[in-house]
Image: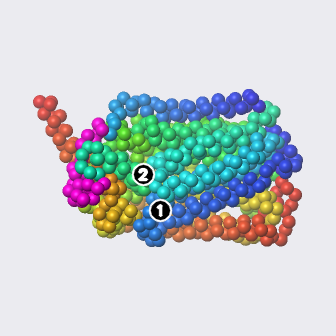
Amino acid sequence: MTTATATATTPQADAGPLVERPIVKAHIIAGFSFFFLSLFAGLFYALQLSRLYPFPGVQLLSPGRLRMVHTNAIAYGFLLNNFMAALYWIVPRLTGQKVLSKKLSWLVFGAWQLIIGGAMLGIIGGKAQGIEWGETPTFVDPFVVLGAALLIANVATPILRIRARKLYVTLWYFGAMMVWMPLTYIMGNFVPQYFVPGAGGAAVTGLYIHDLVGLTVTPLGWGMMYYFVPVILKKPVWSHTLSLVGFWGLAFFYPLNGVHHFFYSPIPMYAQYGAVMSTIAVEIVVFTVIVNFFVTLRGKGDMLRTSLPIRWFYTGMVMYFITCLQCAFQTTLTFQRLIHFTDWVVAHAHLVMFGVFSFWIIGMVVYLWPKLTGFAWWSERLNHLNYWFSTIGLLVMFLDLTIAGVVQGYLWQNLAPWERSLTASMPFWHLRTIAGLLIISGQLMQVYNMWMTARGHSGAAEPAAGEPIAAAS
Amino acid sequence: MEKIATILLAGGLGCFALSVVVEGVLPITHLSKIPYKKLEEIAPEASLDFKDLARRYPAEFKQYYGEANGASFREALKLGRDMYIAEACWHCHSQFVRPVSNEDGRFGKVSYAGEYMNEMFLPHLFGTRRVGPDLIRESGRHSNDWHVAHLYDPTIVVPSSVMPKYSWFFEGEVPNKKGMAVITYVQWLGSWATPEVIAREERQASAEAK
């Protein structure tokens, strides 16, 4: 730990014993396992749309089911596992306190893999739930809530134990996530399923879809950025005040957005108008966060070239800015007429889930892996190659699907026969498959590199624990 | 720290609660003025499509559902919806017609809140993506034969289709219990708002007005 975090609390100089490194490592490994499950499920689904599906007529590998594996594995398997790794790494360092219990950490780890693994099997076996981003079978849902509660008890304890009059923004984000995540999950998975039918249920589902991203993934992601970026840059974030403006702006406006997933549906219009306004407001909030980070980079811009984690992080931030700028336009009812139901939305979802949060996580792994294994990266070159494969793959996929969305939208609007929208989409879907293959190749390099590094195939020994190391500089 | 924790808890809960009230509870309260109907109320007797299946596949139908009556129809509807969810049909087929982009011209009557206030839309299956067309006005648009062929291999009837084959809904070339259920469910979607039903209701309304 360097002094660079400039937190209100004073992190200890030697954070080694505070952080339970094996649990961080275990979560990263589990996360990447689910990553590949998701990547290949996505690839198969893309092949179905390209009409090249290798297993037609196989019930357990039905593309419809694999699509749910794709999204749920990325959200609950890849993102949350890696975010847990980040929590176990960051929270003790910022608070100077250990998590509640090492045993509990491992219990949560094991339980979470069982829960998400069970959810995947349930989905494959035809027990999925009809809630978007909540397809985890109904019998899994209570266990997800329980697992989340145990995790929160574990990582909230160190935050509650510290005596400080100010809290660093990372802990604001993490703390708020701990309040929001269980509420969001309970609301989304139980209310539309058992209590509220039709349009009212759709309003709640909209809130759920959006809060899962906005109130769970986003706070964890930004909390991570506010920690890792200053540590690696060795300078504090430009403005603590602005960072809190961003936090409270997100807290206030983000949850109001949900209904924008169902515009022009029978949900009462005032709820839809409210969603338009608050979505545009979020963009202004996002602007303050982005400005803060880019001003922080001033004088250290060279590190975009020299430090791979910083490059992953800032690329993700640019993608985040594009995502949210897009939001401000596509949330208007005018845009919705054309792009809703099309591949435009799919492009948007990949930009945020892969281009932002997965990029940040890969950046974190590039930074943390040598510290966790005790060896410098086996191959710097593969790390750089993955950056370019992922970035180019994502940008191609994003632009390709965005244009496809506009084409589909106009064909539908013009009342062309439905099949025209399929034949017109075909070249776009082929290109998307190729872009997906680029992304997957990049990740294969990443894990091969991680494997070789962990086995000790590297020249340089790991520098003192906690110091930014060769890979980052 | 207690002070900060309190601010965080109160602020976090407050913002969340505000959003749930404005964007959730208020719309739900308004919509709850429409009476909620149980399945028995909306599907008292077997649909023509369900009876048609019984005629086409008498032996198999008898084995799976017995007689084509209200009870067996409701059983098929529920099973059909469960299969529709299990196979994630709703990820590629939406279930609401928007009042814009000529959707009423393509699909039929624009969706209204009342049609979703029943047991069959718990959970709702609005969907957010259309690879294939919307299905909330599907009732009567195609024959049962068309649906059988389409589920068996979509490219038989729609050469450019990207929909998967659902061979596990078949016993040989005859739809099995699940297959019949899915067809019954899809044929039921929008049976309350077909052009014929709308025309009949309009005739009745104008007759009452006179």
Image coordinates for residue A189, horizontal then vertical, percent = 51, 42
Query: Is B43 inside the magenta-drawn segment?
Result: yes
Disc number at residue B85?
Answer: 2
Q: Which residues are magenta?
A: B40-64
The residue closer to the viewer here, A391 or B201, is B201
Query: Is A400 inside the magenta-drawn segment?
Result: no
Residue at image coords 76%, 41%: A100
Image coordinates for residue B147, horizontal then vertical, percent = 29, 59
Position of residue B18 in the picture relative to residue A27 (left or right): left
Image quadrant assignment for residue A451: bottom right
Image coordinates for residue A448, horizontal then vertical, percent = 69, 69
The amino acid at mark 1 is Leu
Distance of mark 2 from mark 1, alpha carbons?
15 Å
The C terminus of chain A, quarter of image: bottom right
Image quadrant assignment for residue A445: bottom right
Residue at image coords 64%, 50%: A112
